Image (cartoon, rainbow, N blue to C red):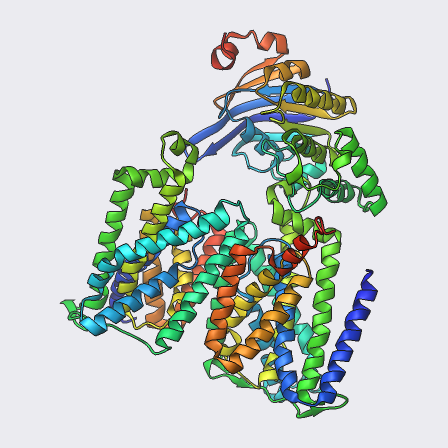
Amino acid sequence: MSEPLLKIEQLGKRFGGFVALDSVDLNVASGERLGLIGPNGSGKSTLVNCICGTLRNEDGKVSFGGAQIDGLIAHERTRLGLARSFQLPRPFHTMTVAENLHVPLIYTVGARSGHHLSAADLDARCMELLALVALDGKARQMPRDLTQVEMRKLELARAVAAEPKLLIADEAMAGLSHSEVEDIVKLLIRLNERGITIIMIEHIMRAVMAFSQRLAVLVSGKKIADGKPDDVIKDKDVVGAYLGT
Amino acid sequence: MRTPLFILIQAVIAVALYLAMHFFGNDYLFFAGYTVLQFIVLSTAWNILGGYCGYVNFGSAGFFAIGAYTSVCLFTIGQAPEDIFPAAILPAMQAIFPLPVPVIIVIAGIMAGLVGLGTGYLTLRLRGVFFAIATLALAVVLQTLIVNWSFVGGSRGAYVIPANTVPVFGPYIQYLFALMLLLVIVALTSARLIERSRLGVGFATIRDDELAAEACGVPTLKLKLIATVLSGALMGMAGAPFPFYIGYTEPGSVFDLGYAVNTIAMPMIGGTTSWAGPLIGAILLGTLQQVATVTISSAVNLLLVGLLLIGFVIVAPTGIVGLWQSWFGKGAKR
Amino acid sequence: MDFTLLMNAVIAGLLLGAFYAAVTAGISISFGMLDVVNIAHPAFIILGSYIAYIVNTHYGVDPIVVAFVALPAFYALGAAVYQIFYVSFEKRGQDSLRGLAFFFGLLFVTEVFLVLAFGVDYRSVDASYIGASLRFGIIELPYRLLVPAVVSVAMFAGLQLFLGRTFIGRAVMAVSQDPLALRLMAVDPTRIKRIAFAISIATASLAGAFLIIIQPVIPSVGRDYIGRIFAICVLGGLGSLPGTLIAAILLGVIESITSTFYGPSWAPAVSFGILLLTLAVRPSGLFGR
């Protein structure tokens, strides 16, 4: 059995007296589509932050690609191949849509390979990414002129621009319409087929079930279920804590 | 416009300006013009960290002072090297000292850059607000240290008397003016180069959203340190000729409150997103203040600057450059 | 080491520290709890000093009494400043650069205005107790330090009671942690913040009176206090009033000892040195959240 791409062992995180994460174990295999669900405040975003380096975990270990990454700063983890989209999109508001994508291309892809992409190369890759999310028409616009779903797509495109091995999509579909949600799920599956391992954090069960090959549930900082989606949603603890009847 | 052309244009303007003033023959113009040029350099330097990265430096006077007092030190050593150096290296030192002003400027830049590096290393891992407060602290600590340091005169001050005239330029002030013109070209060219480079993109992401920048692979701490060092070094270089300009250097004039407020007001009024902003702000405010100091009083002119700063920050936060861009619909300026 | 000298330096430091706490209380609220970087706070304090000076010189009223009478005016001023700040910056979601520049401009303009109005001569006040001391054997408690210290501690106790026991006080503590919850309780976070900020400026009125009792004042004195205020705030831990008091006393004592044995010109460096050290080693301070 090969080593999982992302390995989280007994992860613990506290904020003062409040325990946000408690002995969480989670493995993600390369190429997998993992769904992560749980009530608000259960620690999902804290978990993402600990994985990506925005926060430091007090206990436990995070390993990526076989190597321990606990001591690394966020940008170092991105360069290793870990990317995330933010729950509330955080575009660079003084730059155009296209320029937003330049940033990971320059600072992750370029930095990783050691030689910088030429201006022509940058533009080409940029347009390719924008086409993937159907935003190529808006390349020269400013983020504030985008609609909600377009912002979410930009957020995802920017994460993908870093050429990650693992992408964490943090509630990328909150507040979107039915067809917009389908759009994003299709996009994520397409990205997965290109070889990116994806963790989807969501409340929209329809999307989670359509997307996930495996499902994990986080409640009050503890993982209470982890397995095939159809089994997990029938698990009585999960039903009691989160899904309801 | 490619950079060499930009430098050429600046050089042409600088030479033309200098020659015009030289043949006009009034040394007062050089004295007044020097302060404006000094402010162009200081504001441009401040803006590299403040405008491009979004990190406010309240201690510009501190970096300026490092430059000025490096000069005082080196000049004082140059006056009597035999008092400082041991006999073994004295002949070599006597050959080097007194150092020419351009060399002093470079050394001052290095000193100020190092201090910037140190302060930055201590505080840039924290929120921008703590960095700003630390810079305030730095200026006061430096002032206290210098006031208590007798080698540079302490609170009594030090005299730096340069030659009366210099070959080619004539009166010494014209030589200093020319040096400052050179510094202006260096500052503006650097700022513009940064803006258009990958480094500039990185700086802008730090300003816009540091968390997202890190997530995109931007090494924010390293870039912030670079900005702090560049900014501090330029300020130090601007301060280096000051003792030669003013003759009698005492801490009060070097740590003058006017430096702190002007280096912030000029870029914020001129516009913080472009190299042109500090330039415009410095020329406008600098000239305004020269006029006001002569016609009204220096305290009133500082009051005006402060009020203008508050006004612009509330009403026109993008500065004059920003207003220009929105009137003429430039949109995304790059 | 002269024991009497050391003893009195420590005592003076304790009293001075209590005064520093009063000076810092306002920032502890505005910066520590509301996250508003009001670096102009010292300017309001100096304003308070000058108001105390004018009324004291012309009508002979005790400066602390003047400060209490001026309290409502300072409160209103604080509310007005917060409103401008809120409308211009916080509401627009502007980066903190502009907010900082705004307060810096305010600090600057106030100082220059005071220079124009009063010049750069040192001003001081007259009160019956200034100049006299309370003596216990070798211990000397100068009244000009003792009276402000006592009133400072009282003010601190009052603030702490207010924050802990009243509804508005608790709302202030809550607003920094969970504005949404406040809204759900039909309390407007902006109004609470405005009240809190206004209170922080009101404390400046008292702090100003204390200041001019303790030492003669010129407009630039404000800048000396910026370092002390933020050093105390950071050392004590943002948002913790008890932490502020302890850190203030600590700073007061260290400064007093340094001053006594190495000379007063090193005093500013002490607070700034502590500030830089704390930021480098333990940025959350002694009691920080």
Residue B260 x/y as whole percent: 52, 67
Picture residue at 60% right of the left edge, 20% below the top: A36
Q: What residue appears at the point 71 percent right and 43 percent down from the top-left corner?
A: A96
Residue at far bottom of view = B164
Q: Is residue B111 visible?
A: no
Q: How many marks?
A: 0
Q: Which one is nearer the viewer's eye here, C34 or A227?
A: C34
| Residue farthest front in this picture | B327
| Residue B171 seen by the camera | yes
Q: Nearer the viewer, residue C207 or C144?
A: C207
Q: Position of residue C182 (x, y in %)?
A: 38, 33
Q: The N terminus of chain B appears in which quarter of the rendering?
A: bottom right
Q: Residue at x 74, y 51 (%)?
A: B334
Residue C55, compared with residue A222, is above or below; it is below
User: Where residue C267 sits: x, y (%)?
Assistant: 39, 68
Query: In the rendered view, does A120 fall on the left or right side of C113?
Result: right
**Percent x, y of residue C112:** 43, 71
Q: Is residue A135 above or below residue B181?
A: above
Q: Find residue B184 and report its image quarter.
A: bottom right
Image height of C14 relative to A45, above or below: below
Asked whether, in this view, residue A227 is left or right of residue C128, the answer is right
Is residue A128 shown left or right of residue C179? right
Q: Nearer the viewer, residue B134 or C169?
A: C169
